[in-house]
Image (spheres, rainbow, N blue to C red):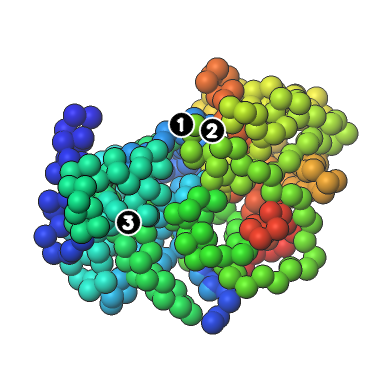
Amino acid sequence: MASFLLFLSIISFLFPFISSSNSSTTIPLSFLNTNTNQDFYQKLTHLASFSLARAHHIKNPQDSSISNIPLYPHSYGGYSITLPFGTPPQKIPFVMDTGSSFVWFPCTKKYQCSKCPVSSQKNPTFIPRLSSSARVLGCLNPKCSWIHPKNSPKSLCHDCESRNRTNCKHACPPYMILYGSGSTAGIGLVETLNLPNKKIPNFLVGCSLLSSQQPAGIAGFGRGMSSLPSQLGAKKLSYCLVSHMFNDIPKSSMLVLDTVYEKSKNLIRTPLLKSPFVAGRNALAGYYYVGLRKITVGEQIVKVPYQYLAPNSKGNGGTIVDSGTTFTFLNHDIFVPVMNAFVNQVKGFSRTEKIERLTNLRPCFNVSGHKIVSLPEMKFHFQGGSEMVLPLANYFSIVGENDVICLTMVSDSRLELSTGPSIILGNFQMQNFFVEFDLKNDMFGFRHQVCK
């Protein structure tokens, strides 16, 4: 860590080459793979562990010191988009993440990523010296406080003489962002984002020089000021997630950002709840909270305990929608009755504890020799009476050679996970759902459809 912080202290000296419509944008969205060498057991184990690590980060966020777009799926559990930055444009892949609000890319030819899959090393990095519009973010730029929300401009620019503050050329201090399974660090840039139907100058983006376990840059789509929708002034964000096939077949759907509001039709809607503002936990304010009231498994109703319905004054409780999480996370007090509801209603199949230990998923059932398997239906019930009926493929997955099936939701009995959101709705449960974040009216809409 000491060497890492030393690196951050000298990071600003590595940049001698730069100085201090249409109403809708659609981007292809695809599933992201970073390790093609894993077998299916390893992939499920990785995804379950990743989802738990992600939940730990979401629930205990660390404040960092810090148009039509194709959306592609990949086998490590996330979805990616490609965005062109700079003049001339350089195309960079990003993980699409509604659970964070900062946009950053791997930057310069000296970019290093420790503990990253070999396949991710083929991803392009942004080269600032090849862009005539790249500028280091200055410490007096208001956007510097988006990266360092706990600091005032005066404290960020303490090296500037007070009488010459308006001419201060100091860069915004470096950032370091901690994620559930890794980290990244670099400096802020203001750069041109080239969307299909418009150019966005002076877009705040992170130029990361060091990362750990981050296979690609991250495009934050949360509710914070530095997120991509916020910087574009989007009124709506919508996307449709293609099925997880745990491979890199080039299949994509579309992510749409609307800057002119028009109400969508044929959607089931529930309110987006007010995000909590908690000192020292600024990330909570960027999450998309919804009012999940109960879960039904077949004939059994699992009510969400009162203390988990909405975030309290400390930011604990509530349900969020997070595209960066693969398998939905349920607090222990919610997960256990959901698991037991399946165990009590699934008849004629034995549990396979060996596979449960191997994959970190439970319950798992041995269905070998059965051509037809009947499982209880699962529904999410939201505030206002709206219901999300999950297709079977969205909450059970076949493991191995068609002889075992496992519930694709996770939990953890660790005490610290009682903080933060109680339920994190992951992208696996949102496969083949069109979802819309109505940012103007604070509504979350959805409908089941085949995404393509």
Observer-nearest residue: 160 or 221?
160
Quadrant location of the N terminus?
A: top left
**C-beta proximity under 8 Å, tags 1 and 3:** no
Q: How packed is label 3: few (under 14 Cα within 10 Å), some, or many (20 or more)?
A: few
The C terminus sits in image quarter: bottom right
Q: Which residue is mark 2?
A: 278
Q: Quadrant of residue 370?
A: top right
Q: Nearer the viewer, residue 369 or 140?
A: 140
As drawn, is 131 to the left or to the right of 78?
left
Q: Considering depth in this image, is 67 or 301 the residue closer to the camera?
A: 67
Q: Residue at x 32, y 74 (%)?
A: 89
- 386 horizontally vs 178: left or right: right
* Amino acid carrying mark 1 in the image: Gly
The first of marks 1 and 3 along the sequence is 3
CB-based contact (under 8 Å), mark 1 and mark 2: yes
Q: Nearer the viewer, mark 1 or mark 3?
A: 3
Pointer 1 residue: 280
Label 1: which secondary element? loop
Q: Please name the residue shown 37% across and 54% down the image.
A: 142
Q: Residue furthest top?
A: 415
Q: Which mark is residue 47?
A: none
**Label 2 amino acid?**
Val
Left or right placement of residue 165 versus residue 422 in this view: left
Give the residue type that dot 3 points to: Asn
Q: Which residue is mark 3?
A: 141
- Residue at 65%, 29% (x, y): give it: 312
Give me the residue at 41% from left, 76% from top. 199
Residue 204 placed where, x, y %? 37, 59
Q: Is residue 303 positioned above or below 378 on the image? A: above
